[in-house]
Amino acid sequence: MNKIEGIFGSMVFNDSVMRARLPRATFEALQKTIREGLELDRNIADVVANAMKDWALEKGATHFTHWFQPMTGITAEKHDAFLTPVNESSMIAEFSGKELIKGEPDASSFPSGGLRATFEARGYTAWDPTSYAFIKDNTLCIPTAFCSYTGNVLDKKTPLLRSAEALSTQARRILKLFGHEDVKRVFATVGPEQEYFLIDQKVFEKRPDLRYAGRTLFGARPSKGQELEDQYFGALKTRISEFMRDLDEELWKLGVFARTEHNEVAPAQHELAPVFTNVNVATDHNQLTMEMMKKVAAKHGLACLLHEKPFAGVNGSGKHNNWSMSTDTGVNLLDPGKSPAENVQFLLFLVAVIRAVDDYQDLLRISTASAGNDHRLGASEAPPAIVSMFLGDELSGILDAVMHKENYLGAGKTYMETGLGILPKFRKDTTDRNRTSPFAFTGNKFEFRMVGSSHSIADANTMLNTMVADALRAFADELENAEDLKVAVGKLIRRTLREHSRIIFNGNNYSEDWVAEAEKRGLCNYRSSVDAIEHLADEKNTALFERMGIFTAQEVRSREDIMLENYVKVIHIEALTMLDMVRRDILPAVVKFTSGLGESALRKKELGVKGEYEKKMVGNLSALTDSIASLADALDQAVIDAPEGKGALPLAQYYRDSVFPAMQELRCVVDETELLVAKDVWPYPSYGQMLFSVL
Ligand code: ADP
Ligand code: MG
């Protein structure tokens, strides 16, 4: 066996391990459960748990944990040793089916948006057998969903699984109409491209803002930024390539299909793309990837920054969420295919996505809303906050022709007959690239580009699955009653295109004109996260979630609160970090530096020598010092004046409108000052040192 095959999945309790270690009947029962999403028999669970434990112990594990994804957006674990005392001096390693299936973390401190008062804090975690258990840090990790005892959803996995199920159910109804009775399940497939920064760890440690907030809250622009674009796809520096090699190996051990690694546009920025897989596993794997990036970086004396905008004036990081739908028989439903019959089916799924994205633009926008991503969306480096779809000229041409029942002037410049059923062959390689679109068709999948680099992709994919499932549901309702299916499909496709084509935009999304044009089209443009989040529980959205069985109305509202609270907390931490940096490091350093200049001016005066430079600098720096001090006081006051107790929305709006601008003003003056103060006196590494620190 070669090296990569030897490593891959070596820490995963996957199908081949299960086949080798489980009695055949148990293996088959478990597979059936996984394939068909059925409930698991307790007796089977005992056998599986025991086999898992033996396997984990052989791999050196001593502990196990239910691994879950609370609303913090990161993963959580609580470790237990495989230890059962036999008597006062001995123990045996045990792990029961009960422990595998259900856990009870004391989880009172996870955000619940008021769903769970602390006195009834109990929540439980439930095994998700559709994502493999794995070993990390000598601990057997069991992927689980997290709910409260009253049955309320408290995590990101449960709604994702429900949305995937809804999508499967509705897509199968459509497939049945096309005669595909053999399809048992339809999966949402996802390949998330992950952007990140790597800087030297020593430099990182000297920056409280990076440590507490994940981004630089101060920092003057360096003389060299990303303007030369000499880093993009450039040769990897040795330390970086060693990191990537190591990261790949760690991820492969965990069964993550890490494949493509390259430098990104900004200095110190890189990207990792895995091969796509089903949405549940892809989401778990993306969480693991982010965690491993940080861990492996530390081993190499590096710090990995996953924040959406670690450095002002330099491109931020996002996550391109590539999404499609695939049957268990291996057919990608967004592949335009070759034969006309397939094309009609493809077009139907395509217009379902068009309808879904148009009807629920706001949900897609909301799924990417966070204080961090506000720095990125609409900043001419990432899509604007307006959701639209890019289809490319050829596909748009086909749709146009379908809509107007015209002949399509194909890429070969010959007229082709359209009419549904005899569509031209769509050539994938002609999909032009539009890197400015937030939601682009890229040949056989959509690439959703608004997601922030630190976000869990669970949110965006829960929305996508749910809204597309709902469009397919409406289609199936209509078509199942049709007298002539072919005619009905044609009508439905044309009508959907007529009603929803406003969402399609193939032009430059970064341009000013588009903002005006989008407004004319009635598309929503929620510039700030707060503007977006307050629409999560809008009536039409709550109705969607209830209809598709994803959330109750109460759960939707709780999520809105959690998101708003998170926004406030992030800005609050940033504001306090700034105040601390200014008052305890920056001002003392500037004052000391100014007083040195003053002394020099005085000494020169004693000697009868001119000291114009020093005098002028003392004047300038003193003015800046006063201005920094008063802006810091203003920020402090803004934080103190926050309207507590009036609800999450007014508080978030206040932080956006009063605290954040005060932070910006303070930063502006501090950055100006940095450029006037000697390098060895400034208390923090500069942008240049951070961005060009790794050789
Ligand atoms: P680019 O940067 O040009 O968009 P990459 O190769 O970096 O291309 O990333 C493309 C991503 O899309 C990969 O993660 C890939 O696995 C994923 N992908 C390809 N086909 C599908 C599909 N059918 N469904 C979901 N994701 C897909
Ligand atoms: Mg991409």
Image (cartoon, rainbow, N blue to C red):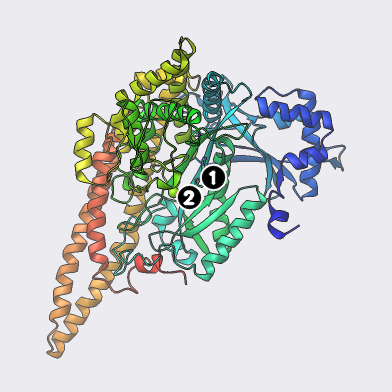
Residue 455 in view of the camera: no
User: Are dots 2 and 1 in contact, CB under 8 Å?
Assistant: yes
Residue 673 lies left or right of residue 441; in this view the side is: left
How packed mark 1 is, by other alpha carbons closer than 10 Å (few <14, some 14-19, many 20 or more), is many
* Residue at screen point 44% across, 26% down: 421
Residue 648 lies left or right of residue 82; in this view the side is: left
Q: Tell me the quarter of the picture where residue 373 sits.
A: top left
Residue 3 lies left or right of residue 495; in this view the side is: right
Q: Is 654 rendered above or below residue 251?
A: above
Viewer-proximal residue among 595 and 656: 656
Query: What residue did someone put label 2 on?
Result: 194
* Residue at screen point 37% across, 65% down: 684
Q: Is 61 rendered above or below residue 445?
A: below
- Percent of width and height locating residue 95: 78, 35
Residue 99 in view of the camera: yes
Q: Is mark 1 within 8 Å of ligand 1?
A: no
Query: The N terminus is located in which quarter?
Result: bottom right
Query: What residue did someone put label 1 on?
Result: 286
- Percent of width and height locating residue 662: 24, 48
